[in-house]
Amino acid sequence: MSAVAVAPARPTITTRAMLSFFDSLIVARRNLMQIVRIPAVLVFELVQPVMFVLLFRYVFAGNIANVPPEIVELGGYVVFLMPGIIVQNAIFGATTTAIGIAEDLKSGLVDRFRSLPMARSAMLAGRATSDLIKNFILLLVVIGIGYLVGFSFKNGFVNALAMIVLVMAVSFAFSWVMAAIALSVKKLEAVQAAAFTGIFPLVFMSSALVPIAGMDGWVQAIARNNPISHWANLARYFAVGEYSQMGGTPTELIILSSVWILVLLVIFMPLSIRLYSKLT
Amino acid sequence: MVDTIIRADAITKSFGDVRAVKGVDLAVEPGTVFGLLGPNGAGKTTTIRILTTLLEPDGGSATVAGFDVVRDAEQLRPVIGLAGQFAAVDENLTGLENLEMVGRLYHLPRAEARRRAEKVLERFDLAEAAHRTAKTYSGGMRRRLDVGASLVGQPKVLFMDEPTTGLDPRSRLVLWELIRDLQKEGTTLLLCTQYLEEADQLCDRIAVIDLGTVIAEGTSEDLKDKIGGEVLELHVDAEHLGRAVETLRGLGSGEPTQDEDTRLIRVPVGSEGPMVLLETVRRLDDAGIPIEDIALHRPTLDDVFLSLTGHAAEMALEEAEEPEPQPEKRKRRRDR
């Protein structure tokens, strides 16, 4: 065998971690350029949450029973709704991770990235990071719209910040779920369908949009154990303070919510990276 | 022992029941242009994807620049470049941004990435479009940008998967020129093509690949010699076709063949070309059969492909999943 090249020393763990971090930032920057170049994409993405806020606030609000009395006092259903919509939006917003990866697969950019000496995790971590930033911008806009329709934070600045951190963590974790879906399904249209059909029932069978108390018996069982309920309940607590039907004490909710986020990350981060490395 | 920079030993790869590559062997010398020639679905792309670490082979082994494509994939990637089948550029980035990004992902310092990006743009005649988003580029410009991206890392070995498929003739010539320049600078190139003319023009050595195996390997001249010497080609009108073939039987080094559709008669002539040409003209004249045109040809790679696989490259293409635009060989032959 001819050794034409001399093997460079394998980089140390620290160097590798540094390199994959910088690689991810380069990819994230490239993804964010899309928003800079075509801001309309962001505007279209805002249509859905705004529509949800307006429909639930002005069509459903008067017909929704079981709103906890503390929340009715604070301003009614819209106060219940907004933290839930914000959690829902964080999850819907993560579907762009699946779509972005599917588009890169289709255009051949994934092949290019995979043939470059960059970290195997960087393309996915970069996508998750850029979507996190995009979802943060969407979150601020949705909060702004909430203020226009009668919502406001009632539990202090620190708790409001805690809600934002929670919601961003949920969004980041779901980005990895979406990455795994995209890398398994691959075809753009199928990825879109798979992402949304999975998420829609999950969000509706939770305490994100309506109180669990009025749901059918068996749905209640699902909803009470749905992590989206834990996140929505906790987000609502951070936004407006304690209320009945919270599903646990604040501490319990923080533990449950964090565990679910960690579980998603621990399963789907390595799974996605593995799927990416083994793409055919 | 001859130095090889790309070596594949019996690599195999299946996708479900489809055996895309059934034991491909390759040996490429440094600084040469090596062609993988074959129709769609022959296994060319799968072979390239294995050699560029995008796919792990099921069996066999391969080394590029001394690195095993599976075991040493991480060390291999910095020294190779890949221009894939699609122009893999980000439409929302400018030409410069695309190349800078690739440079940064080769872990070049920012200034060096920019310097190389600008150099590549200059070289590929894209300097004026450097600050326009790739979305506004023509197909040829995109392809050039894509090939440019594969050069930012200054690879020792460059892999190109059908670099000119779908390009207009001018862009194709520009790319051919680039490939020749890169070779002069010492880069080793492995390129897949389904264009026989392209392999003939560019490649020092060619492996003809069909149904997942290499069926012939050598220089373009070797391959042409394989089917033996020159061929006499002539056209007569349809009513005289059968009689003309009868008249010519026994001439040359093999049986004459005819194509009813194109009214083309081909007579293998070995090294006796001029003699057979004279005799053909004399016999057909005696028989009162008018000749529309007549000429001696060195065999083309078309002929090679036909004789090696039993089917024309174009025929195989029609059966392939995604037919690509193809050169109109048959028509051109009638014209000359």
Image (cartoon, rainbow, N blue to C red):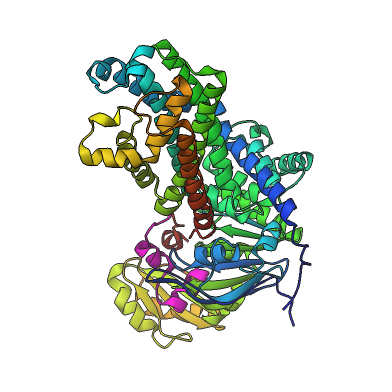
Image spot of residue A186 (x, y percent): 42, 51
Image spot of residue B244 (x, y percent): 35, 77
Magenta stretch bounds: B301-324
Q: Is residue B154 left or right of residue B131?
A: right
Above or below residue B177? Residue A51 is: above
The foreground one among A91 and B18 is: A91
B194 in magenta: no
Measuring 59% from the left and 35% from the top, which residue is drawn there? B93
The foreground one among B277 and B329 is: B329
Image spot of residue A21 (x, y percent): 67, 44
- Which residue ends up furthest to the bottom in the rendered image? B250
Residue A103 visible in the shown view: no
B317 in magenta: yes
Q: Main secondary structure of the magenta part?
A: helix
Measuring 55% from the left and 54% from the top, which residue is drawn there? B84
The foreground one among A205 and B107 is: A205
Residue B257 visible in the shown view: yes
Measuring 71% from the left and 59% from the top, which residue is drawn there? B79
Above or below residue A148? Residue B333 is: below
